Amino acid sequence: MPAAVPESVALERYPGRCPRLSAAQRAALKLQDKYMGTMRGLKPRQRAKIKKIRAAKGFVAAIKAAERMAAWAACSGMLKSLWDA
């Protein structure tokens, strides 16, 4: 049976290998991904509000608020285009 290869050597040997994540780490990564994805569609002033919410209440509350803001922005933009037509 071969001896275990140190992680530093394994990373050099297999550079494309994904690190093993625990369930908690994977859940945190998915939460961060959802947060970053919702932040992409917001304007700078809206982002600042979401960052304050994240600092005060956490990622889940920030994601919900960002999704509401994005939905409202899309809806108001659509209404504006209808009124201008």
Image: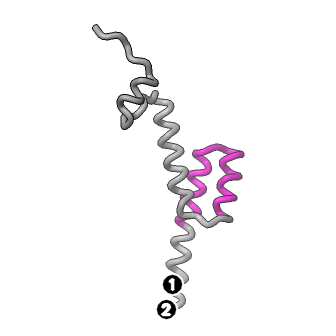
Q: Is mark 1 on a helix, strand or loop?
A: helix
Above or below, 77 relative to 21: below
Say which residue appears at 71% left-offset and 45% top-offset. 56
Q: Where is residue 6 in the image (x, y as percent from the top left)?
A: 43, 18
The local secondary structure at tag 2 comes to loop
Q: Name the residue under label 1.
A: 81
User: Could you say which disc has been placed on residue 19 in the image?
Assistant: none
The residue tagged 2 is 85
Q: Is residue 60 on the magenta stretch?
A: yes
The magenta segment is: 46-71
- Asked if residue 51 lies in the magenta stretch, the reply is yes
Please give left or right for residue 33 compared with residue 66 in the image.
left
**Are the residues flagged by discs 1 and 2 in contact, CB closer than 8 Å?**
yes
Q: Residue 62 at what x, y percent from top left?
A: 61, 51
Left/right of residue 68 with respect to residue 53 in the rendered view: left
Q: Which residue is drawn at 39% across and 17% down?
A: 5
Residue lying farthest left?
A: 1
85 relative to 63, above or below: below
Query: Is 25 in front, or is 20?
Result: 20
Corner quadrant of residue 59? top right
The three-letter code of the residue at mark 2 reads Ala
Q: Which colour scheme is used?
A: one colour
Residue under the image location 53 percent in, 45 percent down: 32
Q: Residues within 10 Å of mark 2 (few under 14, many from 20)?
A: few
Predominant secondary structure in magenta? helix
Q: Which quadrant is the N terminus positioned in?
A: top left
Residue 33 or residue 10, whichever sits in front = 10
Q: Is residue 15 above or below residue 46?
A: above
Q: Observer-nearest residue: 43 or 67? A: 43
Q: Which amino acid does label 1 sit on?
A: Ser
